[in-house]
Amino acid sequence: MTAFQAGVVGMCLVINLFEGFDVLVIAFAASGIAKEWSLTASQVGLLLSSSLVGMALGSALIAPLSDRIGRRPHTLICLAVCAVGMLLATVSTGLWFLGVCRLLTGLGAGGMVAGLPVIITEYSPRRFRGTMIALYGTGLPVGGMLGGSVAVLVTSAYGWRASFLVGAVLTFAILVVVALALPESLDYLISRRPEGALEKVNKLLGRMRLPAVEALPPVPPKEERGVLANVLHGREAVRTVALWVAYFFMMASFYFAESWTPLLLQHNGSSTAQGMDGGLLLNLGGLAGTLLLSVLALKVATRTLTVLAFLGAGLSYLAMSLFLGSTVVALAAAVAIGLFVNASGNALNSIVPGLYPASVRATGVGWAMAVGRLGAFSAPALAGLLLDHGWSARSLFGLLVLPLVLVAALIAVIVSSGRRSRTSTEPAGSLSPVN
């Protein structure tokens, strides 16, 4: 892996970090917003979910454009959308205007977050791919922590709008860096053949210390490289739906734990401080799981790690359900949930791009993430509804045990029997370093 390739991956990590700031900073500004506009709890909840809805729409509708216009221009457009949403938020005067701004920011983030793992996959050698995706995954929680730190520093002196202004400036800054330094996807150039593709391919090959080529490999017929053929047809459709199920329960388990763990610990007898500790330990476990995955991926096949991570997540939820009454064990289970759920998400992101050919790669990943976002904002709402109807905290944690274990089995089947061979995953004669 050359310094050039490492630079591309590093740039994607920084983008994800800043987008983590943009998406999660609202949680730290919400109290100031609610106080200024006298918002009810349900109105605050609507505001908090608006960016998640935008991310779901962005993953479904904007991410597929990357396969048509190229990864680089697509990333620039998404960054611009995020920056505009953050900037407009600084002049918002009411709930609905700010909600639209957050929706706009979510649209850009959702479209881009689905495409960045694709870029990392295409510029990482196969043996480093899981590690690079895992390191990339640290951007979101670190960005969230950065957002919280900035919010604490600037809100007291300048008000909640200042945190959005900082996010807008940072996003515009990375936009300039991307415009100057981010290369186009090698696989996109090979599969779509824009003007000057051969010259651009050879330039990229040179920067990766690979020999130049005299001609590009043959392009498969359109009917063999379209969305219908590679995403929604026959066995491909079965595999796609299986991946949608995996993303749905992965994000449902993540956002349920993030949203409800502190409150459910208190609901089951823990103190307020212990509930807050549970939320903190959950996030620390998530960061540890992401870093651990990046190390293990150097030695263990990522598909194996994905199955084990989902199994671990299911067992962690089981432990929380069985031992919620013991504060010490419950806090340990919170660490385990954060560790395994975050590891499963990053491991899933590392294997899914390789299951689709370059011509529809961003579309396949984007649609899977869009379905996952449905789990992201439906799981916390469903948990509240079930609590109102008499469900216990133990039963809520137990509800996700079986789905996570079944997803582990589903992933094992996908990667063993439905996985593409190299020759069908990449264009014929592919020059990509992922081989």
Image: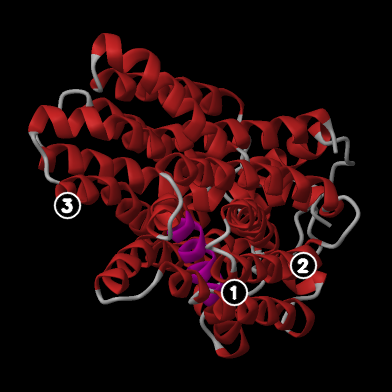
Magenta segment: 243-257
> Amino acid type of disc 2?
Arg
Extreme bottom residue here?
A: 234
Q: Is residue 201 left or right of residue 277?
A: right
Q: Residue at x 49, y 44 (%)?
A: 274
Q: Earlier in the sequence, mark 1 or mark 2?
A: 2
Q: Main secondary structure of the magenta part?
A: helix
Q: Earlier in the sequence, mark 3 or mark 1?
A: 3
Q: Is 2 placed above or below 158 here?
A: below
Q: Can you tell which mark lies on residue 42?
A: 3
> Amino acid type of disc 3?
Ser
Identify the secondary structure beneath mark 2.
helix
Quarter occupied by residue 13: top right
Q: Residue at x 50, y 48 (%)?
A: 113
Q: Nearer the viewer, mark 1 or mark 2?
A: 1
Q: Position of residue 351 (x, y in %)?
A: 70, 63
Separation (CA) of disc 1 from disc 2: 16 Å
Q: Is residue 147 left or right of residue 67?
A: left
Q: Can you tell which mark lies on residue 404?
A: 1
Q: How many marks?
A: 3
- Label 3: few (<14), some (14–19) or many (≥20) C-alpha neighbours in 10 Å: few
